[in-house]
Image (cartoon, rainbow, N blue to C red):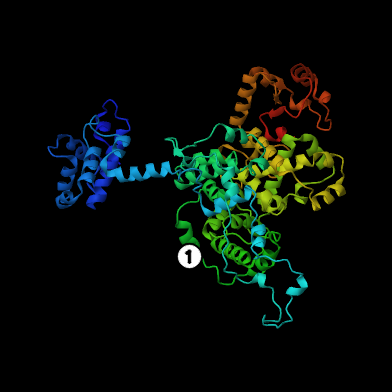
Amino acid sequence: HPKYTAPEVFLNLNGASSCKVDSWSLGIVIVELVLGKIIWSGMKLHQYLSKVLSLLHSHNSVFEHLSRECDSYNEFENIEDNLRDFIECCLQVRASKRKSARELLAMSLFEKFSEDDRKRIDENIYKNIMARKMDELYYLWQLAGGDMTVELRKHGLIRSRPPILSIPNLIILLGQIFGRRDTASLLDSRVIKVALDTLRQRLSHIPYIANCPRLTSQMHVQMHLPGDSVDISSDLPLVIRERDTEYQFYRIVLFDRLLKIYPITRRAIIIEAHKDIPPPVRGAVWAALLGVSGQMEKQYYDSIDKETPTHTDRQIEVDIPRCHQYSELLSSGAGHQRLQRLLKAWVRNNPQYVYWQGLDSLTAPFLYLNFNNEPRAFACLSIFITKYLHKFFLKDNSAVIQEYLSKFSQIIAFHDPCLANHLQSINFVPELFAIPWFLTMFSHVFPLHKILHLWDKLLLGDSSFPLMVGLAILKQLRDFLLVSGFNECILLFSDLPEIDIELCVKDSMSLYESTPCSITYRTHQLDQSKASNWRQPESGTEKLPRISLDDYLQLFDKDKQLNSSKLITIDIRNSSQFERAAIPNSINIPFANVQLSQTHIDNLGPQALAALLPNCQTLTAHHIVVIIGPHDQNNML
């Protein structure tokens, strides 16, 4: 704001960008607080500039001048001398006479605080202090070897008893219990202290200042790291990083700092989320990645009717007990109630959609991470479905699902033609196994701990990323699929084997980065920014995807720069058109010479054989073949 800006900034004087301009801004802020008034309110930009520059000609101190303008001279006279001196040192019109932050701290106003601070330093009160929130401390304590069950058992709050001894003598229909009762289910008001000695020892070399990282002007966090141990840990596998107490401490501190001033740090959060996300802050980070912020979500969620019965209530009540029932949190009574409220709120808030089975599994991760923050869970769910599952929950979603599965088949053919041809030969189509994958974004397929790691990366991509996840799963099953028939494949996917989720995420990211954006385009996706320049064929009519001109030119330029010959362009126009103008290094195979019944390269004519063999000897999975021609039908064939 211009009124908080030092005069030398407007005059463009030498040294205008020094740290002393902050002293001026601080002085103006304190003047408003002390006088209890907003100075120069309701003015236009040129009026603010005129007011600031007029202070250069003031005969009195700037502080006195401002107090007279605000009709607050009495307050000015009643201010303590040391505070008045401090403000006037901040508001010196000449930057050379204005004090810096370090000089301001040395003034008498802070003498008492400086003395107390020196005493604390002498007493080592700042040494090895972990100034973290309770949930973060508990998480770090567990990483350091803490076990709450052991602690409760040690203090007698948990006792091992034969189950038969906890059964009551009688339970009537109204739920009243007579006779023996398990006291473990009753509230115990005793409080036990858990020692943090192990955690303190593990983090003993970390300075107190590490709890307060600096934020750069580019909105990145500058950490106070002892050596480069954290940088080394960032290269280790995720499963090791999540068990490294020191690494997790620094990651929690970093994200906590970024989240406090979100959304202006959203870009930095995205950059850091590409590395990993610490479990204690995962819910808040997911919300930031999805663009959720502020209190509007709470007000909006509270205004939605979640109590009135609807026609979907019965199906919701059937699905909830089966949703991730292995999770103690989600399978609890409170978990069922919260999940039911979220599902009813979403159905009520989206009248254009219907409740499909699987929506409960899709909601579960957001509830798990925001168990005590339903509005944020609801906001995340709503944005997530809009971004990744646009139109999936229509009453008639057959066209949307069919297009998505058709695109999945094309992606398989693009990255792994051998697997695609085999699955087609045994008539094992994605409709037989992939619908639950994409309808629930794999939350119905994997347990929660795997979903959390998978969605950490999924939220960093667009709506095409789930296609790459599906392909990454097939990649792990590839060897078995290539030697299996239809029945064996059906049995395999009826009880999906263990999937290495870290490898799956790694392969998904690699496939996502190496896939041209245009070949994943769908007419039913949310982002339609390029729809005007794109002609999408009817779903299921083409086995291979189309590529846009922009993506093709990028591949062409990259291939030319690397001199790799990985891009093979086949021009199916007739010879006279090809000779008139053609893409450099493209291969002319006139469509009239192609025999569609013959699939071997020798049958494409001498042009193909002569052009392909000198360049790349043989086609591999790393080559991209692009067919270009004037007629869509010929290209498709």
Drawn side of residue 59 relative to residue 165, left or right: left
Q: Residue 356 versus residue 406: which sits nearer the camera?
A: 356
Image quadrant holding the N terminus, namely top left
Q: Residue at x 65, y 70 (%)?
A: 185
- Label 1 Cα neighbours within 10 Å, binned few <14 / some 14-19 / many ≥20: few
- Residue 467 visible: yes
Amino acid type of the residue that numbered disc 1 sits on in the rendered structure: Ser
Drawn side of residue 159 relative to residue 367, left or right: right
Q: Residue 369 versus residue 109: which sits nearer the camera?
A: 109
Image quadrant holding the C terminus, namely top right
- Residue 529 visible: no
Residue reaching furthest to the front: 123
Q: Residue at x 68, y 47 (%)?
A: 404
Residue 2 in picture, x, y percent from top left: 28, 40
Q: Is residue 616 above or below residue 63?
A: above
Q: Residue 438 versus residue 192: which sits nearer the camera?
A: 192
Residue 220 in picture, x, y percent from top left: 47, 37
Residue 538 in picture, x, y percent from top left: 68, 44
Where is residue 180, by image quadrant?
bottom right
Secondary structure state at the residue bearing disc 1: helix
Q: Residue at x 21, y 34 (%)?
A: 93
Q: Which residue is mark 1?
A: 303
Residue 247 in picture, x, y percent from top left: 59, 40
Q: Residue at x 62, y 29 (%)?
A: 552
Q: Residue 523 versus residue 115: which sits nearer the camera?
A: 115
Q: How many marks?
A: 1
Drawn side of residue 345 relative to residue 322, left or right: left
Q: Is residue 376 above or below residue 617?
A: below
